[in-house]
Image (cartoon, helix red, strand yellow):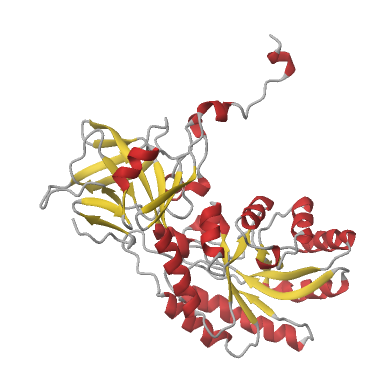
Amino acid sequence: MSDDLPGAPDFAYRGGMLLAEETSLVALAGAVGTPFYCYSSAGIERQYRRLAAAFAGLGAAIYYSVKANSNCAVIATLARLGAGADVVSEGEFRRALAAGIPGERVVFSGIGKTEAELRFALTHGVRQINVESLPELELVSKVAAALGTTAPVSIRVNPDVDALTHAKITTGLHENKFGIDLAHVPAAFVRMRALPAIAPAGIAVHIGSQLTSLAPFEAAFARVASLIADLRRQNFAVERLDLGGGLGIRYRDENPPAIEDYAAMVRRITGGIGVRLAFEPGRLIVGNAGVLVARVLYVKEGATRRFVILDAAMNDLLRPALYDAWHEIVPLAAPAPGAALSPADVVGPVCETGDSFAVGRNLPPLAAGDLVALLSAGAYGAAMSSLYNTRLPAPEVMVRGCEFAVIRQRPGYDEVLAQDRMPGWLANR
């Protein structure tokens, strides 16, 4: 097996064992138990610096999309490099603040912001609220006026561009729930001008996630550039352009565009517009910087299939069950040279057929007690995990060279059960 793993440059075999930077994943398994998530500081920092370098000279701001991985240590790692935060809930906003990102470096996105969430955002000096409907615009005005402040608002545009990605993560088609249709944006600007306590800021667009071609971006950005020209002809000021995120990463055999090529395309389309640019990358920064480590519980030979049953499950990593997503699966101990590969279904212990990580995957021999890593699990792994089947959430670990820190502990059963409350008519019996 090659020392180089697909999509995981900070995880490599040395001396026959898989390391995270300079840290043994086997040693981490002994320290924190399995399953657990492990993130590479170097991988996170390198991707951010590469983005910042590609956008140099554009006057662009980078707002990390917190939903990809919302651990405060991950956010703080990026905050120290200069990142802001793109959030979609009050909870994510609070995480950004706790990690050292002030409100003036937070963009608040999402189609269902509540009155309480808007009040929180405005009270904490939010940089920008990306409004996705006229009713939301009215509510923002009402909340800002009641607070005696002014809300900086950008209109999220739905450009009706097919992102050519998974149906559940495309957001820029007119059938999708996101944004305001292009044709209705001028009317939204008219209404924005009439409403009190609103400061029109600009335009925002985000067409989906895990895009592996520049063509959909280019089509969407060109439509938005044309829209801005039209709005200015109608004497509307458009100072900011938020281009969202969505550039894909390698999970299997994808060949996503280079960050530098993406930046060059942005320069070509927006170079003459005269706006302040913003980007909201998430998966692109953290996706390949994390792995999920699990232990083999059993290997079951069925009539026609081999089942490798792990102690990780769909409550730990939902993406395969939700999206049929591919994650490379590798043993922590490198197999012997020339070891025979054979198909196996890699599954979890949850009582659902959908609790599966891979079907018919060619893997080396595995036995109970062996450790494996599911690669490219830094985005939408821990952030989407749950207590389903009352399974304790996997802890999260961050490494830096040969050091590591537990950045989210595995809770105990007493702690989990203490969240439940008995009603009086049951508690007294």
| Residue 241 seen in this snapshot | yes
State the residue in front, 400 or 339.
400
Left/right placement of residue 189 relative to residue 290 reads right
Locate residue 195 relative to residue 353 in the image: left or right.
right
Residue at left 23%, top 36%?
A: 305
**How far across and down, in percent of the image, does residue 171 sit?**
57, 62
Number of numbered discs visible in the structure rendering: 0
Q: Residue at x 44, y 63 (%)?
A: 44
Tell me which corner region of the image, top left, top right, bottom left or bottom right, holds residue 207. Answer: bottom right
Residue 260 on image: x %, y %: 43, 79
Q: To which quarter of the image does residue 402 belong?
A: bottom left
Instruction: Please determine whether, in this image, residue 259 is positioned above or below residue 311.
Output: below
Q: Give residue 345's position: percent from left, percent from top.
A: 28, 41
Q: Nearer the viewer, residue 23 or 224?
A: 23
In the visual, does 426 lie left or right of 271? right
Does the image show residue 243?
Answer: no
* Residue at 68%, 74% in the rendered image: 203
Q: Residue furthest front?
A: 403
Residue farthest to the top? 429
Residue 35, quarter of the rendered image: top left
